[in-house]
Every structure is written in C-alpha cells, then in structure tokens.
Amino acid sequence: MARYKKVVSVLVDNQPGVLTRIVSLFGRRGYNIESLTVSVTNVPQVSRITLVIEGDEHMLDQMIAQTAKLHVVQDIFTLDYDKSVVRELLLVKVAADESNRGAITEIANVYKAKIVDLSVGSMVLELTGEQNKLDGFLSILGEYSIIEVCRTGITALNRGAVHSEGQ
Amino acid sequence: MKLTGSEILTEVLIEQGVDTVFGYPGGAVLNIYDTLYKYQDRIKHILTAHEQGASHAADGYARATGKTGVVIATSGPGATNLVTGIATAYMDSIPMVAITGNVSNSLLGRDSFQEIYITGITMPITKHNFLVTKVEDLADVIREAFRIANTGRKGPVLIDIPKDVTAAKCEFTPKEPIRLIERYEKDLESLRRIANLINKAQKPLIYFGGGVASSEAQAELAALVDKAGVPATYTIMAAGLLSDDNPLNLGLVGMHGTRTSNNAINQCDALICIGARFSDRVALNPGKFAKKATIAQIDIDVSEMNKNVLVDYYLVGDIRQVLGDLMPLVEEKSHPDWISQIEAWQRDDYHPQDSETELKPHQIMRIISQTCGEEAVYVTDVGQHQMWAAQFLHHVNPKSFITSGGLGTMGYGYGAAIGACCGVNGAPETISANGGLKPCEDPKNSGVQNGRQGGAESRPRPIVHITGDGSFHMNLNEGCTAAGYQLPVITVILNNQVLGMVRQWQTVFYEKRYSHTDPCRKTDFVKLAEAFGIKGLRASNPAEFQQALSAALAEKGPVWIECLVAKDEKVLPMIPAGGSIEDIIMD
C-alpha cells in the first residue's frame, strides 16, 4: 500500500505530561513520528503540537483516531499542504575560512539565509522555509564541510481566516 | 462548608452513586481510611487480601452491575499492585475509578518512601489519569473521572492524591451528578446502507462483542436477530447477551469457537460486526477473515474501524441507539437455505462424549448451569477452564459471565467473583454502627447479611467462580476475604495438576515438550479451604460433583469444590493462532 506523509495539528491541554501521553501512545502502537514541535498558542490553556507522520492510508487514520481519544486532545486535524503555511527552521554550522567564506555567503544570499555566527574557522547559517527548500540548501552546502546541523521540525498553520478545520 | 480532601473524596463518591468500594489501607491513604470510618453507614468498604484482588473486585462489581467499580490503594506498592487489575479493565473497556494515595506534595519527585510515579506507569492502561496537587481541584477531578470512565468507550481512570491533599481543607459545594447522555447523531445514510446490506444478503451473519454489553443493547440485538432472521455468533466478551436458547445463536466464534460459527464467518456474504473489534483471537488471520462478505461495523469507538480488518461500511455511535434506529429499516425475513446449511454444520460440530466415571469438563459446566440456574453469575479465571466455561455453560443473561477477555489475566477470578457478589447480592457490613469492628461471625450462625438488598426472604444469586489449579494458585489468598465477609462465592477448581492451556499448546505445537507446565504441586485444596475457614469439597465423577454443588448452594458462606480432571483434556475445537477455518483442530 502506498505510503504518505501527513502534517497533523493537535491542539492539547496546556498541562504537564501532555507530550508524554502523545509520545507514549505513538511508542506503544509502533507509529513513527517524523517530526514533532510543541508550542504555546494565543490561548493560554491550549498548546499546539505539530506532527509529521508517515504510513499507509489506514495507518495514518489509525494514528489520528487513537490520538483523538486521548483526554488531553481537544482537537486534531490534518493540514493540507496546498492550503497551509508549513515552515521549518534550520541552523547549520559550516567550516569556513578566508578561502570559501565568500562563496558560502553567496549561497546563503540566494536562499535568503542569515549568517548568525561567524568565527575564524566556521560560520552558522539560519534558514526558515519549507522542508524541500531546507533540504536543497543543505545539499548544496554539502559541497563544503558541514560541522553540525539542527532542524526544528515542521510547524504549520492553515491559510485564510479559519482557525482550524476541526473534525 | 469546609471539608478535608478525604471528606470531599467520600462526599463525591456518594454523590456519584457509589455505595461500595474495594481497597487496602496504607500510609498515604490513612486520612482517606479515617474518613471511610466516619462514613461507614453511607459507604461500604471491602478489604481484600491484596490490592490486585481489590482491583479485580472493583472490575467484577462493575461487570455484574453496570456501575463504575471503585478501588482504593496506598502509594508505591499499593499502587503498583493495582496495575494488572487496571490493565484488565482497560482491555475489556470496563468502567473503573482507581484512587491511589501518594506521598505529600513536598516529597513528590524525591524517591520518598513508598513513592511511585503511578500516573506515568498507568498512562497506557487508563483512559486518562490525574495527579491532584491542590485540594481545590479534587471534587471536580473526581466527577470528571467518573464521567470519563462512563462515556464513549468505557474504561478505567486513575486519580493519584498526595497525602497532604487528603488532609487539606477547602470549601466544598455538593453537585447533582450529571446524567450521562451519549452524543449521538442519527446517520441515516449509513443506517440505510447497513440495512440494505442485511436486507439483500442471502447468507448474512451478525458477529457481536462486549460493546453490546457496555451499551446494554441486548434487547435491541435480539430484536434485530429475530426480525431479520440473521444468525449470530459472539465473542467471549458477549456470552449471555443473546440467549443460548435462541436457535439463531451459533455460539462462540474464534480460536475456540464452534466450527459452525467459524464456518459461517468464512461463508457468509454479509457480516455485521456489532461492538466487537476483530481481535487476533477471532480474526486469527485478518487477511482471510470473512473473505466472501461485505463487512459492516457498528461501534462507539471510531479508532476500531479498519484497525485489524478493513470494513466496507461503518457507523460510529452508541450501539443501543444505532440498533434502535436500524430496526425500522430492516425487513422481516428468513434465510431457509442458509439456516439449513448452518444446521448441517451444527450436526457435524464438536460434541464431546459424556462419562459417568470421570469428570469431563463439558459435563462440569452443564451440571453447574443446571444446578445453579439462570440467575447465577459465572466468573472465570484464565485458561482451559475459561474456554470450557465460555463454550459449555448455558448463557442466557447479560452481566452473568464475567471473564478477562482482552488481557487474559490468570488470577482474575476470585477477586472479580467477590466484587460481583457484593454487586448483585449487596456488600456485607463489617464495621458496626456504633463504631468498632464487628467480630466476624461464625459461618454456622449465619448472622451476616448476604441476602439481596430489599428483603430477607430473597435468596442471593449464586456466584460461581470457575477456575483452574494454575490460575487459582495465583490469587487464592482472597479466600480470606470470602471467608471473613462470609460471601457465598462457590469456587469450582478444575484441577488437572498441570498448566493446561500452555500444556495443550506444547502438546500440539511443541511435540509434547512439557516445559514447566507440570509443576507437581502438592496442594490439598480441601484442607487449604478449611485452613481459610471455608468449606472444602472434592469430586471425581459427575454424581459426586452434582452432590457437592447442591451442598455448596445450601451454604451461607464460601465453598471450594475441587474437581479432578484428566491432564490431557483439551479445549476443542481449536484454530491455531494466525490460522483460518481450514486449520481447525477437532480432536
């Protein structure tokens, strides 16, 4: 069966242990989380967890249905790529000296990445965007010597005036 | 009015309609127990030998009455001892509220004496759990726990209360319990599709499970079966919901189900699954399950749809309401060709031979049903005896066959039977009204009130705990509970001297390499019963068993009857795990 990726937004009670409940559910049922972000929302009692999950159609439905049963989950819905703003933040540290600093800066400019740290032997670049943009940026930087990479995982919102699609 | 946390707990329990709780005291719940002492005329507490027994008792109470079972335990080991009982209830969707004490807030997270992170431990085996750190939150948390346990797909909820919260005082406002009404929207399109499927089918079959019990939809189910003329087969969780006297009832389905039921699953052209979940003990090979059928599923839990077996239609909702709405759309019908095919299978099914000289498991079950009557509540442990009980008892009433289906918990039975007994016959009192413990009465004086509430004349419903020597050894310590409270629980021990179910698998799949299933135990159950203050009897043939059981029914207190059964007796038919009807073993 064909496998898909889904971006899922989960609105949860802002309480201690909520993340444990979600992650424990995924762990015990053998579901794979590709990325996960947690953040506050404009409503103090509600946090938003953005998950990227992967599986066949029925597995994805199962993951959503099982997560929806958790008492701390107020709402859960899939975000349609075409109708959503999907973003991720990347920090990458590249070995750079006088000989290649200019070239790396040029690449950063093309991608509109920011140089957030500069030292004698390295530079740290920051880039925000969709996953494939970040992937492309990293693959070009692969020509140089990457020291460390850190990505936040996806966070996403529906476009337009609606606040969520709900169930 | 200002009350302590313990008083608030007790007040809300009473407000929620709780009259009996099961538990075991300890350091972190001393305040709660002190309050239970003060409230003894309003709420009864049954002390078990072990917290596990108390958790199974709360579960058995819930299954026998339909009410929420309540269990109380102290922190640390008290709480961990509840784990198996909570998991058992979770797997079978039984409403239960477990209350644990914990160390005081100031000691939490410091590896204090008898501290355990029970909310973490029970996260995967509860519908939800709470740690209440403020006394102000307590009342509403308890109310919410009862609501969660009882709505949607039912299940256990745990409330962990630090000791200082049980002592702290705050303002308490009593509230009327809210009437729980399932949110249900009539889905006419899905109803029509399912009705159409039933109406058009040549070989329809209903496969129903424990969801029918949770929804108390037995009358609607029987009406549907009769009106549409659809034969039905059930999972172990649903024994008794449709009377075995109904000719359209084909009996148990799955691994140890009748061959007729499994044949019907294999051959039907429409399968209506009602409150069941295509578990691996029923849909042993999900890829081959009901391959010729269009499958429709009705359940309250949307996450059960397409979980193990892909279905063609489904309808999510409370089963009783769904079936009520489905009825007018279903045509009155009969399926003579299909039924005559089924009758041919039934003639050809597994029919074990009777014996007069030795005790055959099916005869034990038949004698139990005939002697104890339709009012009896049967509670089992787990293993061969459980399957024989499911297969051969005469199931005619709901809430009358209590068994650990999902988790398969050996040692479940005695605690559950004690809980069921307190539920249907009323819990005994052990603390007298003027304070102080009432001395336990001598069984012969029979002064203890075991009669059903509402009249001294009424005879208590027989509670029959059916177990094996393996399961019984796990938690027979609850004998002291049955004896202390003089609970009329009859324990029938099918003693084959071996761990029969595992041994059966070793016989069939491991070339008779009986690894650790033949323990050579020397337990004398009759003497052990006497040591507990329980009447012990032994039977080695049907006549002796009949006599022993009749004698047991006349007793006011608990009785153990040891039945000597041959160690090579098997549970048949049997479809191996992962197999299909083609792999069925009949002898």
Image (cartoon, rainbow, N blue to C red):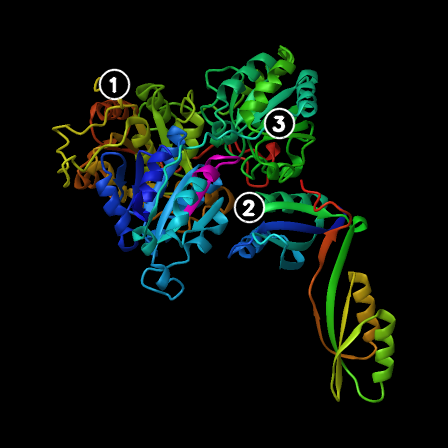
In three-dimensional space, the C-alpha distance between marks 1 and 2, rounded to whole angstroms, equals 44 Å
Relative height, residue B147 to residue A137 (above, below): above
Q: Which residue is mark 1?
A: B458
Q: Residue at 38% of width from left, 29% of height from top? A: B65
Give the left or right position of residue B564, taking residue B584 as reference. Answer: left
Q: Position of residue B325 (x, y in %)?
A: 60, 19
Label placed on residue B185? 3
Q: Which residues are magenta?
A: B146-159
In the image, which is nearer the foreground, mark 2 or mark 3?
Answer: 3
Which residue is at the front of the view, B225 or A96? A96
- Which chain is mark 3 on? B
Same chain for mark 1 and mark 2? The answer is no
Question: Element type at marker 1?
Answer: loop
Front-most of residues B176 and B210: B176
Q: Is residue B406 visible?
A: no
**Marks 3/1: CA–CA distance:** 42 Å
| Viewer-side label of 3, 1 | 3
Q: Amino acid at mark 2?
A: Leu
Looking at the image, do the residues carrying marks 1 and 2 touch, with CB atoms under 8 Å apart? no
Inspect this view and state whether residue A56 appears: yes
Query: What x and y, as percent, mark residue A84?
Result: 77, 51
Q: Residue at point 47% right, 23% down?
A: B241
Decide: is B227 above or below A48: above
From the viewer's perspective, tell me whether residue A146 is left or right of residue B28: right
| Residue B338 position in % (x across, y down) | 63, 16
Label 3: few (<14), some or many (≥20) within 10 Å?
few
Name the amino acid type tagged 3.
Answer: Glu
